[in-house]
Amino acid sequence: MPDADTALCYVGACLFEGLNLNEGRGTDTPFQIFGAPWLDAEKLLQEIAPEFLAGTRLTTTEYTPRSIPGKAASPIYLNDSCRGVRITIADRAAFRPFTLACGLIRTIYALHGSQLEFKDHFDRLAGGPALREVLRGKQDISQWLADVEKDLADYDAARPRLYA
């Protein structure tokens, strides 16, 4: 990973690896951009709910994934022009990369349901099928994310403290 912002974005953008989206591999800013030839990035930014955008600024971009030896030999949409979105972290303390990724995927599914594909390994990345079903509109995403936040807070309170 080239920098700390990439690592922070990866927390949510890794889910794009389970979809037919390019997650920025084949560029100098993996996980900070994503896209596909079929993505209407402008419409996506118009439609995504503000509740998913804390600590970030999203802008449209166009890019072409290329082969980068030792980093991305054969990224999805290799040498194809992708319409995409650039994620810029404006406030690290407020940024919620997993929440952002869920909001983006949910909105992309609403806009491009017939084109967005969940690959077989999406459920492995997400820890099971529940998130896939939420993102396909089977459950209220805001409530599901609130439940996840509660579970994370409970885990954080109970986990051993290995570092000061």
Image: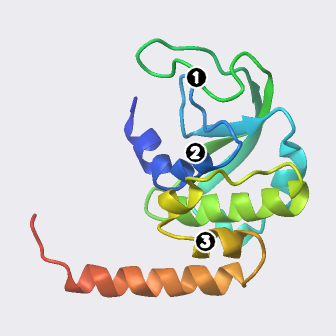
Quarter holding residue 157? bottom left
- Crowding near pointer 1: few (<14 within 10 Å), some, many (20+)? many
Q: Residue furthest front?
A: 120
Q: Please tell me the numbered disc located at residue 54.
A: none
User: Compared with residue 60, is residue 109 higher up or lower down, i.e. above or below?
Assistant: below
Question: Residue 54: horizontal and vertical position, in percent?
Answer: 60, 65
Q: Dot 1: what SS?
A: loop
User: Compared with residue 93, is residue 41 higher up or lower down, i.e. above or below?
Assistant: above
The residue identified by callout 1 is 26
Residue type at the position of mark 2: Glu
Query: For the point 51% across and 14% down, which residue is it?
Result: 68
Q: Quadrant of the C terminus?
A: bottom left
Question: Residue 142: horizontal and vertical position, in percent?
Answer: 66, 81
Question: Which residue is more in the foreground, 39 or 121?
Answer: 121
Residue type at the position of mark 1: Gly
Residue type at the position of mark 3: Leu
Query: For the point 55% across and 53% down, which residue is it?
Result: 121
Q: Please tell me the numbered disc located at residue 131.
A: 3
Question: Which residue is more in the foreground, 130 or 152?
Answer: 130
Determine whether, in the image, residue 105 is placed left or right of residue 148: right
Q: How many badges with numbers are in the image?
A: 3
- Crowding near pointer 3: few (<14 within 10 Å), some, many (20+)? many
Q: CA distance from mark 2 to mark 1?
A: 13 Å
Q: CA distance from mark 1 to mark 3?
A: 27 Å
The residue identified by callout 2 is 17
Q: Dot 2: what SS?
A: helix
